Image: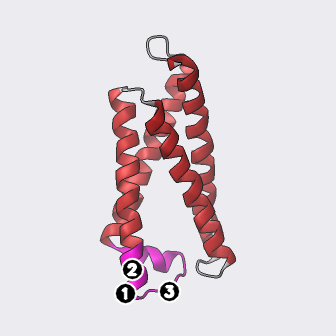
């Protein structure tokens, strides 16, 4: 994939760039307006929940931004891609647990589904990178 990227690899990279951008933007929304995002998910808005949600948003910016930079710079760091996939998978699980516990409304399962599909795409890309890089 480094020098001989296939159309599939280029397509996966483009999809991951879009996922990275959406991760950064949604994280920024959580940092700037955590109460609004909590409202969309029908979650309680307390001082603690808005602060924690903003903190989670900050981590989303960092992970999404790191993945975006790696993809755009074509640094091909498989370990960075792996951990971005782990973040997406765990975010999906956390949202599902939040819905199961009644913290978030079922509408939040859309967020969990997006993160789950995103993690699968990231892991697929990571596996292709790992095979190429060795």
Residue 101: image location, x then y, percent: 66, 80
Q: CA distance from mark 2 to mark 3?
A: 9 Å
Taking the image as shown, residue 32 lies to the left or right of residue 87, namely left
Residue 98: image location, x then y, percent: 61, 74
Secondary structure at numbered mark 1: helix
Taking the image as shown, residue 62 lies to the left or right of residue 84, namely left
Q: CA distance from mark 1 to mark 2?
A: 5 Å
- Which stretch did the figure color magenta? 33-52
The residue under label 3 is 44
Secondary structure at numbered mark 2: helix
Vertical placement of residue 35 versus 77, above or below: below
> Which image quarter: residue 131?
top right
The residue under label 2 is 50
> Which image quarter: residue 130?
top right
Q: Are marks 1 and 2 in contact (CB under 8 Å)?
A: yes
The residue under label 1 is 47
Q: Which residue ends up furthest to the right in the rendered image?
A: 100
Q: Earlier in the sequence, mark 2 or mark 3?
A: 3
């Amino acid at each position: 994939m480094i020098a001989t990227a296939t159309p599939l690899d280029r397509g996966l990279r483009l999809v991951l760039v879009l996922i990275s951008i959406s991760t950064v933007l949604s994280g920024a929304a959580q940092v700037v307006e955590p109460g609004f995002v909590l409202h969309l998910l029908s979650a309680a808005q307390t001082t603690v929940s808005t602060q924690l949600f903003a903190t989670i948003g900050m981590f989303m910016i960092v992970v999404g931004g790191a993945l975006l930079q790696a993809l755009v710079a074509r640094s091909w760091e498989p370990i960075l891609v792996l951990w971005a996939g782990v973040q997406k998978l765990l975010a999906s699980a956390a949202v599902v647990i939040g819905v199961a516990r009644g913290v978030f409304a079922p509408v939040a399962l859309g967020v969990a589904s997006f993160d789950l599909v995103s993690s699968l795409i990231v892991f697929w890309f990571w596996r292709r990178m790992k095979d190429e890089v060795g």
